[in-house]
Amino acid sequence: MFSREGSARSDGQNRWLAGYLAFVGGFVNSSGFVLVGIFSSHVTGNVGRLANDAATGQYAAALAALTLILSFFAGAFAGSVIIESRFLGRSSARAYAFALSVEAMLLLLFTLLSYVTVSEHPRVRDAETSLLCAAMGLQNALVSRLSGAVVRTTHLTGVVTDLGIESARWFRFWRRSISEMTRVPLVLGRNPAERPSFSKVLLLGTIAASFLAGAGWGAYSAVHYHHVSMLFAVVAVAGFAAYALGNSLSQS
């Protein structure tokens, strides 16, 4: 699972990786929102918030939004350094295990801080959310590096866009098939309607479904179990780190 990167990976390996970590991404994003009222798994909303707060003169809030953006960047940077440097040895699986362990520790630190913090001040909540942003940035970089930029697991904008593109290609392909059987021209345009990649659609569908399932479970857990709910994500990521470490030991 962690010994091969990019094009050397199979479609099945990418789907397994995408499904597991997209569930975690959806869980963290949804559970974190219920707990602190801020989404953490993507940057776009925080950029909009930064612009709005700056335009309305709420400079402290704008600075907090910038901190969330930089935290996501810092997580991606740290994860990439861990994986690229291989400072724990030459095993790529061991590097991924360490990166996942760091993500689990960030999620655990958020759980502990949010549990003991009694203040509901927006800036305090921003400070807590920065830990989630760093964890999600790290996860996004890790998955992107491992899959060769094929998989994203912390947001769905690009995934839904790609699903729309692939659906349009399938629509044209099916119309071509019907056109060939009925001898009725149904395909518009000069560009030939070719069969799309079913494995790509399956991968995108896996990410979307897993993220949605994780978001639903994360919201439910946070509503019913409050701050303890984030421990589910901690265990899930730590377990994946242990799996990666097991891979590295089996290869050595």
Image: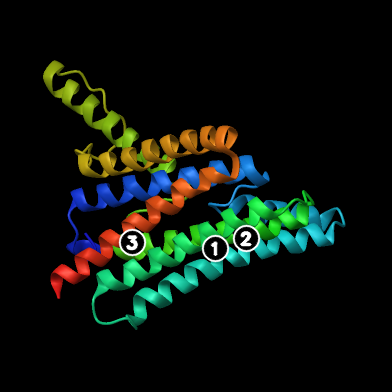
Between 42 and 221, the one nearer to me in the picture: 221
Amino acid tagged 3: Ala
| Label of residue 169 in the image | none
In this picture, is 193 found above or below 48?
Answer: above
**Residue at 27% of width from left, 63% of height from top?**
244
Examine the rendering and report whether any part of residue 4 can be seen.
no
Give the farthest residue toward the top: 182
In this picture, is 32 found above or below 103?
Answer: above
Q: Alpha carbon of mark 1 to alpha carbon of mark 2: how far?
A: 6 Å
Work out whether mark 3 precedes mark 2 in sequence or the reverse, and give the earlier one: 2
Q: Which residue is tagged 3?
A: 241
Q: Which residue is tagged 1?
A: 134
Amino acid tagged 2: Ser
Amino acid tagged 1: Ala
Q: Which residue is tagged 2?
A: 130
Image check: 245 left or right of 114? left
Q: Position of residue 204 (x, y in %)?
A: 33, 42
Per the image, label 3 sits on a secondary structure element best described as: helix
Q: Position of residue 223 (x, y in %)?
A: 59, 33
Image check: 40 left or right of 250? right
Between 122 and 147, the one nearer to me in the picture: 122
Image quarter of the C terminus: bottom left
